[in-house]
Amino acid sequence: YKSVQSDFNFTEEIKQLNFEDIKQLLLYQVEQKQLSTREEEIKRAIAEADHVVTKNIMESDKDICPYCFQKLTDEYKKEILSSLETIFNPGIQNHQEKLENKKQEIQNSLNNLKNLPDMDKLDKNLFDNIKMQINTCQTEVDEKLDQKIQNPFVSLILDTNFDNLVNELNQNLDQLEQTRKDIMNKKAKADELKQELERLNKQIAYFEIKDNFNYYEEKLRIVQALNSKKDHNDRRLECISSKISELNAQKGQINIAQDKINEYLKYIFFKEGRLELSENQGQYVLKSNGNRVKAKDVSTGERNAIALSYFFTEIFKGENSKEFYTKPKFIVIDDPVSSFDFENKVGIMSFLNYQIHKIMTGCNKSKMIILTHDLMSAFDMQKIIGSLPQIKINDKNEVIFIQRELKNQKLVDFGKKYSEYKTLLNGIYDYANNSISENINIGNNMRKVLEAFGTFNYQCGIEDITRDKVIVANLSPEQQAYFENLMYRLVLHGESHAEDKTKTLDFFSCISKDEKQNTAKDILSLLYLLNKAHLQKYLQKEQVEKIEQWVIDCKI
């Protein structure tokens, strides 16, 4: 490989020289025309450089010579142009240009050949001899071309020994080309040898490290197996550790939940210790005003307060207290104020107000659905939502509030209602007038209206309205008997959520729709008879006129 490797990289072929085209140019004779006496005069009159100007004048459409002001006829112009063609033969100029071009071409070709790079590395003596021969040929050719350019009318030939010189030069060039080919072939062979040597090197290296490599691969497989086992055990350890943390968190969660529930209960009842949970051997213990009680012995409303407090504690379980309200929540609460007396209802609504504000302002993606059958609670929700800060985002309120009412088995817009009493009164009228097909709370609503009417007007309950002689003084004896019986029937109906079902005689679940509608008419008729102005303030004129017609039918 060392004997044939070389940095020589001359890929261009060395070509032989050919002077046949030069010989042909030298032999070519330009035709020499004989000039007439007039043409000789024109030649003497027009200098070599001026004949182009004269030619342009003769070829133009001018009819007066710009120099001598002689009239120029077409015939005269043709004569002068013909004479110029004869005197200044264009064939001579073309031939001279070819000779000049060929002279420059052969000079460039021979000079390039003499200056070929790396030729000394091929054969210095041979290349020196070639350069001498090139110089001799170049001198001979330049001299002949110069003679021909000066006199293009003669035919010239190169010296007799010129062909021998060119043949000898081409033989030397051929020999030099062969030497170049041999070196380039060796160079190609060297590249092949180098590839083979590299292949052998790799084989030698393979055999030198084969045993060590096999040992390495065996250990690598063992390491990979151990790493796989380690990864498996790490995952198991992570799961076990996570489970231990979860169990420890659950173990301590009872105290966390207990504190949070008690905090909520204190907020609801507005009194510390009114109802609270304590821990006893890992279990919850319920206390009321410091005394331990059983869950079944507290009221339904109190149990619901505990359930609601536990609910809000549970949905925030496992979260940092600072992040409780910053994450999206979707919360559904069904009838949170059922079975509470008025004081505790205020506490529950206050607690809900607190939670709704925190949830809805803490994250604008949170959503809440609150269901209730209690009309007062619906009004309270309007107040709660109305007090929320209405921060604008993209020109829209951050908190969106939608209130719907279930009416005739369809959800309709609840609308903006300003009075629970007026809403109930209008609802009873619509039911009595058959404007709505069904109202499952019609019994409760009638009792609420009568209770409110009796309390604010006469400071008495439902059963006393028709028994008090002062109140019913303006009613006829027949009407007094009729409405006293009606009041008795209403008293027997208690609110379904106030007590257990077994303790309630649900009068309105046992009577027909017609009877319910008649009862609604009777109640409105009683209010009309007792205080006509009262109904006129709360109902529209046509509604009061309708009630006046119902009053006539209020007889036993």
Image (cartoon, helix red, strand yellow):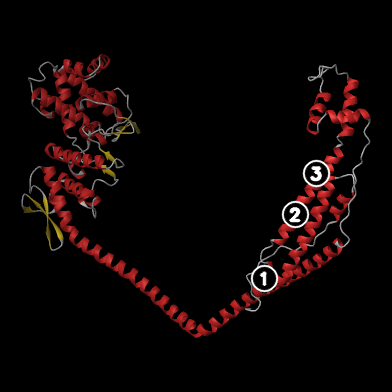
The answer to whether residue 431 is visible is yes
Q: Nearer the viewer, residue 9 or 356?
A: 9
Q: How many marks?
A: 3
Q: Which of 418 and 41 is in front in this view?
A: 41
Q: Which of marks 3 and 1 is in front?
A: 3
Q: Mark 1 points at which residue?
A: 121
Q: Judge left or right: residue 493 versus residue 440.
A: left
First in sequence: mark 1 vs mark 2: 2
The residue carrying pointer 3 sits among few (fewer than 14), some (14 to 19) or many (20 or more) residues within 10 Å by Cα, namely few
Residue 33, numbered circle: none
Q: Name the residue under label 2.
A: 107
Q: Mark 3 points at which residue?
A: 97
Q: Where is residue 53 in the image (x, y as percent from the top left)?
A: 79, 28
Q: Residue type at mark 1?
A: Lys
**For numbered disc 3, what is the local secondary structure?**
helix
Q: Position of residue 548 (x, y in %)?
A: 23, 15
Query: Are the residues tagged 1 and 2 within 8 Å (C-beta)?
Result: no
The answer to whether residue 338 is visible is no
Q: Quadrant of residue 164?
A: bottom right
